[in-house]
Amino acid sequence: MKIFCPYCRRRRATTDILYRCSEHHGCQPIRGRFLRQPTVCPKRHEIEERVCLCGRRLPTNYCESRSYVVAIVGGAGSGKSTYLTVLIRLISKVVAPELHAGFSDADDDTARRYLEMETRLFENGIALPGTQVETPADPRDPLIFRWERGTDSRHQKLGFLLFYDTAGDDVADEQHTRYIGGYLREAAALILLVDPEHLDSGADLADRLPAQARHRVPGPRTVLEYVTRPRRAPGRKSPPIAVTLTKIDALAERLTTQSAMHRRRSPDSDDRESVDEQVRSLLHSWNADLEQFLSLHYRRSGYFGVSSLGAAIDQGKVDSLGVRPHRVTDPFVWLIGEIGLV
Ligand SMILES: Nc1nc2c(ncn2[C@@H]2O[C@H](COP(=O)(O)OP(=O)(O)O)[C@@H](O)[C@H]2O)c(=O)[nH]1
Ligand SMILES: [Mg+2]
Ligand SMILES: [Zn+2]
Ligand SMILES: [Zn+2]
């Protein structure tokens, strides 16, 4: 059996995982396959932590469970970090309770980083800072959450959701794509965020810019090509992809009042289909058709429209009415259905 290490982004055989005591004051970690339970370290502390060969401690139960990388991609400024911050809050407050699932952070770093993002946006009403492009010298870990289904322990299903937020620029830069390829190859689900502003009335902006400026505002088609490029592990199915228009609050005037996208979320499939249809035709009207590309490379795709904030940011501040998310969880709910987490 193999696991995907969320930190070094490599697949490791579970027999290569190291075990150590929780005190780890100089005790040597032990290779999993030599371990006979129960065991204590030379200093007589119980051996309970699992450590990847890269040296990072893996979350509790990580090696016994499946992990699902949810990669959030899109051009810089398309709204990825904001979306992720709002989405995680809504998963924990709405989606998980509705599905009787447990959702909680899986490591201290996730807890700390997420709290910082959440406090900034929801409590202090300050827009999130631009995401730094990741480099090998300054790697960025995904946010890792536990997803637990079923209260009866016999039927309990535990999985780990690894949310990976890209900087945006890195997606269209070949060197960076190679680096973040470790996640893209593993992605169980993809959320492609498309900012309607990047599509203004005509062609994909990226196609109209000189080559050297292109990477700055990659259009959805360019982003899609880059994220599709890293070769998937053999035998792995293509991940479901949710093509998601962001900031639809800013689109209000361009949509008819009956637009399904304006309605509150409703769980029926008619609703799903009308939003799908509408987003597809909007993309078509902006010459940003992705359908042909998607049908060639992805078996399952869905179209969505969301607004993370419900209104524009004004001078770096959230609107005085606060964050008012609209349809933010639709893509996620569809994706977890597709990957069998519900
Ligand atoms: N009107 C509106 N603007 C948004 C929304 N979400 C994000 N933005 C704006 O888009 C900017 C970029 O968002 P960010 O999440 O940093 O994008 P990223 O670079 O893709 O991570 C933010 O500063 C906001 O001004 C939204 O739901 N509505
Ligand atoms: Mg960002
Ligand atoms: Zn590792
Ligand atoms: Zn010890």
Image (cartoon, rainbow, N blue to C red):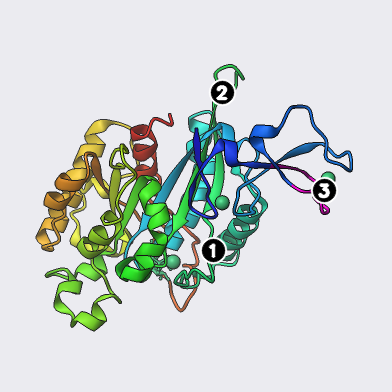
- Gap between marks 1 and 2 measured at Cα: 34 Å
- Residue 156, numbered label: 2
Secondary structure predominantly adopted by residues drawn in magenta: loop
Residue 219, position in %: x, y? 23, 67
Task: Magenta stretch: give its range.
Answer: 19-28
Q: Which mark's residue is nearer the viewer, 1 or 3?
A: 3
Q: Earlier in the sequence, mark 1 or mark 2?
A: 1
Ligand 4 within 8 Å, label 3 CB: yes
- Residue 23, numbered label: 3
- Residue 206, numbered label: none
Residue that sits furthest to the front in the current view:
34
**In magenta stretch: residue 21:** yes
Residue drawn at 20 percent across, 73 percent down: 206
- Gap between marks 2 and 3 measured at Cα: 30 Å
Residue 268, image quadrant: top left
Q: Does the residue at mark 2 contact the one at mark 3 (Cβ under 8 Å)?
A: no
Residue 115, position in %: x, y? 62, 57
Give the labeled residue for mark 1: 121
Q: Amino acid at mark 2?
A: Gln
Quadrant of the image containing the C terminus: top left
